[in-house]
Amino acid sequence: MVMALAGIKVLDLSRLAPGPHCSMLLADFGADVTLVEAVPGSSAKLGGSGGMRRREAADHAAAYNALGRGKKSIALNLKEDAAKAVFYEMVKSADVVIEGFRPGVVKRLGVDYDTLAKINPRIICCSISGFGQTGPYSNLVGHDINYISVGGALGVTGRPGQAPAIPVNLVADFAGGGLTAAFAICVAIIAREKTGRGQNVDIGMSDGVLSLMTSAFSGYFGGGSVIRPGATLLNGAAPFYNTYECSDGRWFSIGSIESHFWAALCTVIGTEDLLPKQFNQDEWPATIERFKGIFKQKTADEWMAIMSQHDICAAPSSKWRTWSPTSTTSPAAWSSRWTRPLARSSRSASVPS
C-alpha cells in the first residue's frame, strides 16, 4: 500500500509535545521524518551527561515514547558552523522543517524560513508556539494550561461555583498544536503543487484552541448563549449527558441526547416516568441525583454489559492499569507487537499497516 505522504521528507527541530506529535502523525502516513536533536550538554536546559542511572532511565523512556515512532534521528549543535552546514545539506532535499522554539530563535540560529528558502525554495517551515510569532503575547512563556485559558477552553470546564477542571495537556498541545500543525503542513504541501514554492506556517496553540471553540463562539454571537462551567447541556448540566460513579468506584458516561437514546436509557434503568421530562431543565438536578443512586448499584462493567445490548450512548471510563485493546478499538491505534528494547533504536515501533 502506498502511503499518502510517502516521499515527503521532514526535519523536526522541535523538543516538546506539540512538534513531535505533529511529525508523528506525518510519519504515520508515510513521511520520512528525521529528528534533529540537541547534543547533550549543548543547552543548559537539557543538562549535562548525568549519571548512569539517569541515562538508563532516559533510554528506557525514549524506547517507549510513542511520539518518536517511525522516525530517525541525528544530534546537531546548530550553534556550531559545521553542524549548521550538515543541516543545510539536509534541507536541500527536504520538504518540511518543524520547529517549536520561542519566536526569534531560529533566526538567531540561521535556520529560519527566509534563510532555508534560499537553499531550497520548495521548503515548508512550520513554527509551533504558544501565542504565534507576532502579537503582544508572542514572547510570553506558557504551557497548555495557559493556552487553553487564552483560547477559551479552560473557562467552560468544571462544575458551577468550582475551579475549572484542568485537563491533561491534550487540548492545546496535541489538538490546537500538533494536530493543527500537521493539517496546515498537508495544506501547504498541496499549495506547493500549485505555486511551486514552499511557505512559512505559523501555528499558535492558543489560536488552535480558539478554532476548536468555533461552535461555542458561534452560539454566543448568534444567539447570546454563554457556556458556563457545568451549566449547559454538553458540559454537565443535563442528566442524559453526564458521568456517574458506579459501585466499584469507576465512572460511567451517558450521552443519550436524542429522544430515542433517552427512551432506551430510561427503559433499561427503570425510569420511564422521566421520558416526557428530558428537556425540562427544572427537573435536571433531581434527575441527576436519582441517576447517581441508580448507577451506584452496579459496577461499570456490569452497566456496560447491560447498556451494550440496547441502543444507548454509554461507556465506562477506562482504567489505565487494565486498559487493553478491545473489539471496538481501532487496530491502527495499537502496535501489532510490543517488545521491551534494551536501548534506544534509530527507529521505534510504528503503527501496523
Image (cartoon, rainbow, N blue to C red):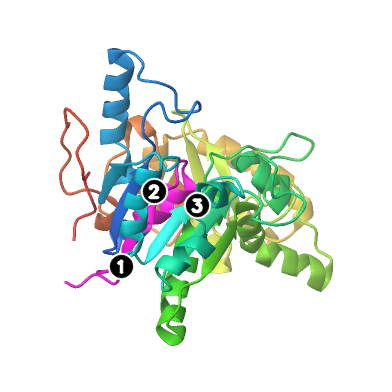
Residue wearing tag 2: 84
In screen coordinates, is 30 left or right of 118?
A: left
Q: Where is residue 194 in the image (x, y as percent from the top left)?
A: 44, 86
Give the structural element (helix, strand or loop) at label 2: helix
Q: Residue at x 80, y 73 (%)?
A: 222
**Label 2, label 3: how far apart the Cα atoms are:** 8 Å
In the image, 111 versus 85, the foreground residue is 85
User: Answer yes or no: do the residues labelled 1 and 3 have beta carbons within 8 Å?
Assistant: no
Q: Position of residue 322 (x, y in %)?
A: 31, 33
Q: Position of residue 42 (x, y in %)?
A: 42, 30
Residue 321 to residue 220: above or below: above
Name the outermost residue toward the right.
224
Give the image quarter of residue 274.
bottom right
Q: In which quarter of the image is the N terminus?
A: bottom left
Residue wearing tag 1: 8
Q: Earlier in the sequence, mark 2 or mark 3?
A: 2
**Label 1, label 3: how far apart the Cα atoms are:** 23 Å
User: Answer yes or no: do the residues labelled 2 and 3 have beta carbons within 8 Å?
Assistant: yes
What's drawn in magenta, residue-wise?
1-25
Residue wearing tag 3: 110
Q: Tell me the number on the disc at residue 348.
A: none
Asked whether residue 19 is drawn in magenta, I would say yes
Q: Which of marks 1 and 2 is nearer the N terminus?
A: 1
Q: Which residue is drawn at 19% across and 38% down?
A: 345
